[in-house]
Amino acid sequence: MKIGITCYPTYGGSGVVATELGKALAEKGHKVHFISYAFPHRLNQFINNIFYHEVEISKYPLFEHSLYSLSLTSKMLEVIEYEKLDLLHVHYAIPHATSAYLAKQMIRKQNSDIKIITTLHGTDITLVGLEPSFLPLVKFSIEESDGVTAVSRFLKETTLTNYQIDKEIEVIHNFIDTSLYKNVKNKIMRDKLAPNGEKVLIHTSNFRVVKRVADTIKILDLVKKEVPTKLILVGDGPDRSECERLSRELNLQDDVIFLGKQDGLEEILSCGDIFLMPSQSESFGLAALEAMSCGLPVVSSSVGGLPELNMHNNTGFIAEFGDVERMAKYTLTLLQNEKKYKIFAENARARAVNNFDIKLIIPKYEEYYEKVLVK
């Protein structure tokens, strides 16, 4: 099968999932063509059957703003025509699904019936797409896709409700390579991060407001009063400066370690004890799944798709977003009870392996591709 994939090539969850999906499909013999404005950062080595097509963005002075969506359409059209793609799988509704629809209309004149599959990841539906200027366009693009998938039941129901869409949406959860993200503790790295044997809390995100990264620092402040603890923050974004200020204000600057954007995340996670995800909005929680696969219990908010992933009082705990005191209490419950912690850690790893392993999810995408192709 010849598959085109368009995604944002950045550190965000949608780009990570799309890239890992493409790599897995290529390893199974499919020809995968990535179409984006930059090389996806997870494609860090040569992989047979993977090809990259860069979208060239016009800098003509007449255009005050970049016409990326139109440039993307042109590149999609070119790749569909010359690579004879069977389907185009776009991740994130706008502008990817919109550009794909336009490319499909143009290629039809050449008797090509390219199929378009749109995967909804979260903020394209729950935030950006709800803006009045975008809502009709998102609704149209979803309805005109040949197939639509969502990464959680929550996101599926939100899409159907918010956009009043009468269309079948397939839920295919995000996935993880549990052979890469595994429960193997890195003692050397841990000793550097927590040299005095402190417990280690970890959070990874893009430091946007909805991630509520500052709450992790407030949780640390409460936990540290009873248990010596360090907090490792991985990622970067608009809220980082505020988080650095808060850590100094609470006199935690020596206990909050900002690592910035990092590759090799599995090695960092292996140093941790508990993963914190206090988000205000989370359609699935891929970062939490990565931590669970490494054997870290998760203390999270109860929003969005997180309850589908993190089982309360089993793989971790969930609380209302903003309830820092309860999250701190749950964290202490695990840190102060070794037997309970071990059970939760084993449950977290088992849930990742038994429900979200890449070998379980990729066949679901292949089956869905076949279903859409015969429509």
Image: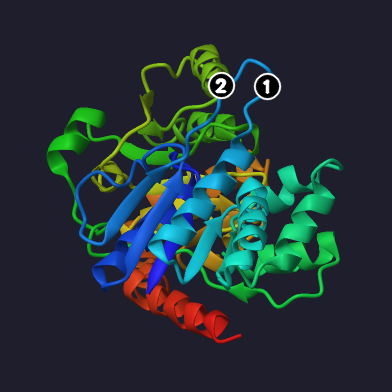
Q: Is residue 125 above or below residue 59?
A: below
CB-based contact (under 8 Å), mark 2 and mark 1: yes
Residue 188 or 354: which is nearer the viewer?
354
Residue depicted at 30% across the width and 43% down the height: 265
Residue type at mark 2? Lys
Which quadrant of the structure image shows residue 176? bottom left
Q: Is residue 250 above or below residue 40?
A: above
Which quadrant of the structure image shows residue 165? bottom right
Tag count in the figure?
2
Quarter the N terminus occupies? bottom left
Residue 354 or 29: which is nearer the viewer?
29
Q: Which residue is mark 2?
A: 59
Residue depicted at 50% across the width and 44% down the height: 8
Is residue 51 shown left or right of residue 82? Answer: left
Quarter the C terminus occupies? bottom right
Which quadrant of the structure image shows residue 268? top left
> How far is mark 2 from mark 1, CA to CA?
7 Å
Q: Which residue is mark 1?
A: 63
Is residue 322 shown left or right of residue 165? Answer: left
Residue type at mark 1? Phe
Q: Is residue 252 above or below residue 367?
A: above
Whether residue 215 is visible, yes or no, is yes
